[in-house]
Image (cartoon, helix red, strand yellow):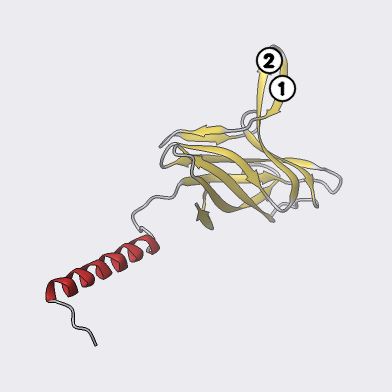
Amino acid sequence: MQHLPVPALVARLVLALCALSCAAAMAAPDAKKPPLVTVEGAWVRSTTPSQQGTGGFMKLTASQPMTLVGVETPLAGVAEVHEMKMQGDLMKMRAVPALALPAGKTVELKPGGYHLMLMDLKHALAPGSTMPLTLLLRDAGGIESRVEIKVPVAVRAPATATVPADNQKH
């Protein structure tokens, strides 16, 4: 067995402890870190059996500048962020590739404005059921995140409540 001089042994021990400390810090969740996005008052409009599309609505507040770049759900063939606005005396609706979520400012997705458009539904959405949605976000540095939520299905907007995010992934 080879004996190391004390300074070399101490140096190796310090390096090993630093590596362990860094690994633990990266693996441990930061309890003080706020969620990327807070979702409030979320709901999806219920549908009839023959209806192929519906809308999703909510209030989003980002803890840092973020961009909503998409939405996914297993219950619809197509899920997009849409905008409705008046052009002259005509209401127009179109998909938008991204929606800015300024830090600390609430952005409302609501009927007649920005909203989630859910098309090619796999089945009717009954009042009282829930729809899983994944919000696709991008931060100012280009890092993409996913926020998974379960949204109540209703005929009209329910009383405002915070929807807990099941999972936030980078």
Q: Is residue 77 left or right of residue 147?
A: right
Q: Is residue 165 above or below residue 117?
A: below
Residue shown at the point (73%, 46%) measured from the top left? 46
Position in image of residue 61 (x %, y %): 47, 40
Residue shown at the point (77%, 41%) measured from the top left? 53
Q: Which mark is residue 92?
A: 1
Position in image of residue 58 (x %, y %): 57, 41
Q: Quadrant of residue 150?
A: bottom right
Q: Cα distance, mark 1 to mark 2? A: 7 Å
Image quarter where the N terminus lies is: bottom left
Position in image of residue 128 (x %, y %): 69, 55
Residue occupying the far right of the picture: 50
User: What amino acid is at disc 2?
Assistant: Gln
Q: Is residue 63 visible?
A: yes
Residue shown at the point (53%, 39%) measured from the top left? 59
Report the number of discs: 2
Q: Is residue 57 left or right of residue 90?
A: left
Using the image as rendered, state which of residue 96 and residue 165 is in the foreground.
96
Using the image as rendered, state which of residue 102 and residue 2 is in the foreground.
2
> Disc 1 vs disc 2: Cβ atoms closer than 8 Å?
yes
Q: Report the residue marked by disc 2.
A: 87
Crowding around mark 2 (Cα neighbors within 10 Å: few <14, some 14 to 19, many 20+) is few
Q: Secondary structure at mark 1?
A: strand
Using the image as rendered, state which of residue 116 and residue 57 is in the foreground.
116
- Point out the tag, 1 or 2, that comes first from the N-terminus: 2
Residue shown at the point (62%, 28%) measured from the top left? 113
User: What amino acid is at disc 1?
Assistant: Lys
